[in-house]
Amino acid sequence: MPIFKYLVLNKSSTREYIEVEQSLTDAPLVNHPFTGEPIKRIIDSPSLTLRHSSLRENKILSADNLQKHGFSVLEKNDSTAEYVQTIGDKLDLEENS
C-alpha cells in the first residue's frame, strides 16, 4: 500500500507532517489519527523501492558476484580472533611498522 503525506493544520510556526499508509481507494483523512487536529493530504513525490527483494540482495552479495566485481571478503575466525580472506585476490594484511 502507498504511504501518503499529510500536513497538520495547526497554529504552530513549524510545519508538521505525518505519513499514513492507506489504500488508493481510501478517502483522504481530515483529522490526525492520534491528536484529532485537522490535516490535509499533500502532493508529494512517491518513494517506491521497486528493485528490492531478498532474492536480488542474495544474488548481488553472492561470492561469485563479489569476486567478479573485485571485492574481497574477510571473515573473523572466532577461535583465533584473526580475519581470514574468503573471497577475492590475496591481500597483504600485515601492518606497516
Image (cartoon, rainbow, N blue to C red):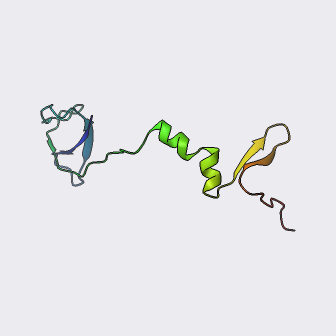
User: Residue 21 placed where, x, y %?
Assistant: 26, 35
Q: Nearer the viewer, residue 71 or 1?
A: 71
The residue shown at (16%, 43%) is 41
Q: Quadrant of residue 40?
A: top left
Left or right? Give the position of 39 relative to 51. left
> Which of 67 and 24 lies nearest the eye of the viewer?
67
Left/right of residue 52 with respect to residue 86 in the rendered view: left
Q: Relative to residue 9, is residue 20 drawn left or right? A: right
Q: Position of residue 85 (x, y in %)?
A: 76, 50
Quadrant that contains the C terminus: bottom right
Q: Residue 36 sits in which quadrant?
A: top left
Q: Point out the image quarter for the N terminus.
A: top left
**Residue at position x 59%, y 49% in the image:** 65
Residue 70 image point, x, y percent: 64, 58
Q: How many marks?
A: 0
Q: Percent x, y for residue 28?
A: 13, 36
* Residue displayed at 65% across by 52% down: 67
93 and 37: which one is in front? 93
